[in-house]
Image (spheres, rainbow, N blue to C red):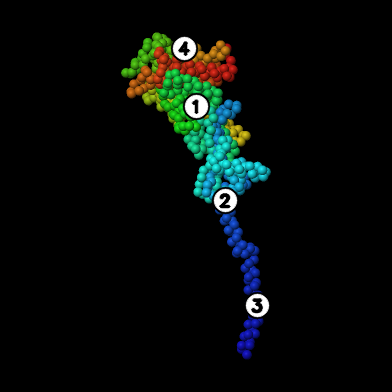
């Protein structure tokens, strides 16, 4: 009886337990996704594959080439090769290139793997020789052409190299060739300015190095695509016509008097470098080695070309006048040192006469009257101890003279102060601009695609009064007219007035100054009333000077006249009234 009752109870309670269990199961699965565990696993696997493909593409673009990836994507015309390095162009209206790159290709194939027409067609796609939508006849023709390329028969107009590998896939490397189109048989025009690149397109010297981060080939990620950078070109301030003329003049000087170095720098009063020619130089496509640039990397005692600066500073700080007088009997003793003038100005010589005769004795006395503190403060204000910031690597700064009467006296006429030529050229800009100091620059702006953006430049600063600057410029105009005949410029028989100064500096060797080793410099600006150009011409240690040639007025001034006449004639400058 008891067993029957238990059995009956179990039958009554069993359905209730099953109902509760089902209800609990329903509650448990409320709000959960409807897919199974197997479906979830499939989604995870697909997501992982997609992620790995993205990483593969990203790593390929960043660090190299994936042959399999290139083979996969080439038929669809997707260019995942590297971009081309941007161009460097001149500052004229035609934007003639000074340096540019062309794309080249290296085709890697396994000579032991059988080649098929399908592979040839994919190679043609990858090299950009044909589009996927081309007709059947064109595809058949291009297959034969690619077959010839693979077997080494490459047309001259195709920048393609063929290399062999044991890899089972073929692939194409995008490379580029840097072209420097303006050159002679022995050198590239403006080589020290342009610089050069490594075979992989990295800038090493000159503007190629300075602008490397701007013009180097790189990628821009955009949504799901990888796009090459837009065409980039940096516009320089260089005038190719003036640069060519400067190079030709230095060739002539090199043939005639064999200097150890020489240079011509043409600059506007606002600092734009129109030409910078230097010897020795190189041909960039044959000898890619850095070229020493003395204009920015050399310190020199520049001599009498510093006298206009001493004059300006004394006029500004102590009220010196051109009519003030000093005695110059040929020599002046300062402490134990004797200063001599090549041509004595005589007793009661005016400052203007001392400037015209380039009297060392007069300007030593001017410097001593100015005083060391005033001299140094003005030299620093004019930036003779600071790099100019020109866009070239390797620029150094000048060294100002230490304290002492002898140092101060000789610095008044350009000795004992070691400066770079580009610093001195900058220091002349206030004379041309009415007292404003401009920093030199080689960059005018940048093209990104069709958009042009001017380069930002530091604003000028006033370092001298307008009256003093104009007075000194007028004095330098008289200096050229009366004393430096070889620097005078004529167009159609009429004179374009020039303001300028020579400097003949003996070079210190083995503890003493050598009268046989000299540096000849002329700095001039024209037209003198409202200068448009400032030009420095320098010949350093010529080895074959004609007999009787001893001064910058005989060596550097005629070079200035040649290039200034060329510019004035080309630009149709009218003679001064």
Dot 1 corresponds to which residue?
185
- Nearer to the camera, 60 or 374: 60
Q: SS class of the residue under badge 1?
A: loop
Q: Are the two marked residues, 3 and 4, in contact with CB atoms closer than 8 angstroms?
A: no
* Foreground disc of the pair 3, 2: 2
- Measured as percent of width and height from the top left, residue 285 is found at 50, 32
Q: Quick check: marks 1 and 2 in contact, CB under 8 Å? A: no
Of badges 3 and 4, the one in the foreground is: 4
Choose between 126 and 326: the one closer to the eye.
126
For image coordinates 56% across by 11% down, the residue present is 493
Split into 4 quadrants, where in the image is the N terminus?
bottom right
Q: CA distance from mark 3 to mark 2?
A: 56 Å
Residue at mark 4 to residue at mark 1: CA–CA distance: 39 Å
User: Along the polypeptide, which appears first: circle 2 or circle 4?
Assistant: 2
Q: Are marks 3 and 2 in contact (CB under 8 Å)?
A: no
Find residue 54 and name its label.
Answer: 2
Question: In the picture shown, does residue 132 fall above or below 206?
Answer: below
Pointer 3 residue: 16
Which mark's residue is nearer the viewer, 2 or 4? 2
Q: On the image, numbered disc 4 is attached to which residue?
A: 483
Mark 2, secondary structure of its residue: helix
Q: Earlier in the sequence, mark 1 or mark 2?
A: 2
Give the Cα separation between the discs numbered 3 and 4.
127 Å
């Amino acid at each position: 009886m008891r067993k029957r009752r238990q059995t009956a109870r179990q039958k009554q309670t069993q359905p209730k337990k099953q109902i509760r269990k089902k209800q609990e199961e329903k509650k448990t699965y409320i709000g959960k996704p409807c897919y199974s565990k197997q479906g979830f696993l499939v989604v995870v696997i697909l997501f992982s594959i997609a992620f790995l493909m993205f990483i593969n593409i990203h790593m390929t673009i960043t660090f190299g080439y994936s042959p399999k990836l290139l083979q996969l994507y080439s038929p669809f015309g997707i260019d995942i090769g590297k971009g081309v390095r941007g161009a460097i162009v001149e500052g004229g209206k035609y934007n003639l290139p000074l340096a540019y790159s062309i794309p080249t290709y290296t085709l890697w194939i396994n000579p032991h793997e059988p080649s098929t027409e399908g592979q040839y067609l994919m190679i043609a796609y990858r090299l950009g020789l044909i589009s996927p939508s081309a007709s059947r006849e064109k595809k058949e023709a291009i297959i034969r052409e690619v077959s010839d390329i693979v077997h080494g028969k490459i047309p001259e107009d195709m920048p393609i190299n063929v290399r062999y590998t044991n890899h089972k896939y073929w692939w194409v490397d995008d490379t580029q060739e840097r072209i420097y189109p303006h050159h002679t048989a022995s050198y590239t025009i403006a080589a020290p300015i342009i610089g050069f690149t490594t075979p992989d397109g990295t800038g090493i010297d000159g503007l190629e190095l300075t602008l490397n981060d701007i013009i180097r080939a790189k990628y821009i990620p955009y949504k799901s695509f990888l796009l090459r950078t837009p065409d980039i070109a940096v516009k320089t301030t260089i005038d190719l016509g003036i640069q060519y003329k400067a190079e030709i003049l230095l060739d002539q000087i090199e043939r005639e008097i064999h200097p150890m170095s020489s240079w011509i720098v043409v600059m506007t009063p606002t600092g734009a470098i129109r030409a910078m020619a230097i010897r020795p130089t190189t041909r960039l496509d044959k000898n890619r080695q850095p070229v020493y640039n003395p204009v920015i990397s050399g310190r020199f005692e520049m001599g009498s070309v510093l006298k206009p600066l001493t004059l300006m500073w004394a006029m500004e700080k102590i009220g010196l006048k051109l009519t003030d007088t000093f005695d110059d009997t040929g020599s002046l003793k300062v402490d134990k040192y004797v200063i001599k003038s090549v041509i004595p100005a005589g007793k009661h010589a005016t400052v203007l006469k001392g400037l015209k005769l380039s009297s060392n004795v007069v300007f030593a006395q001017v410097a001593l009257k100015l005083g060391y503190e005033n001299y140094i403060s003005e030299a620093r204000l004019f930036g003779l101890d600071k790099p100019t910031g020109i866009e070239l690597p390797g620029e150094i700064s000048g060294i100002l003279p230490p304290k002492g009467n002898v140092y101060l006296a000789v610095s008044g006429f350009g000795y004992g102060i070691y400066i770079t030529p580009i610093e001195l050229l900058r220091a002349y800009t206030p004379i041309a601009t009415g007292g404003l100091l401009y920093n030199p620059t080689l960059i005018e702006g940048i093209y990104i695609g069709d958009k042009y953006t001017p380069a930002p430049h530091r604003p000028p600063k006033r370092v001298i009064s307008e009256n003093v600057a104009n007075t000194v410029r007028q004095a330098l105009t008289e200096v050229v007219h009366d004393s430096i005949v070889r620097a005078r410029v004529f167009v159609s028989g009429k004179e374009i007035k020039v303001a300028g100064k020579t400097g003949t500096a003996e070079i210190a060797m083995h503890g003493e100054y050598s009268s046989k080793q000299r540096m000849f410099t002329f700095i001039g600006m024209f037209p003198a009333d409202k200068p448009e150009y400032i030009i420095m011409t320098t010949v350093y240690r010529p080895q074959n000077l004609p007999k009787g040639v001893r001064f910058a007025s005989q060596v550097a001034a005629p070079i200035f006249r040649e290039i200034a006449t060329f510019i004035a004639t080309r630009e149709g400058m009218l003679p001064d009234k």
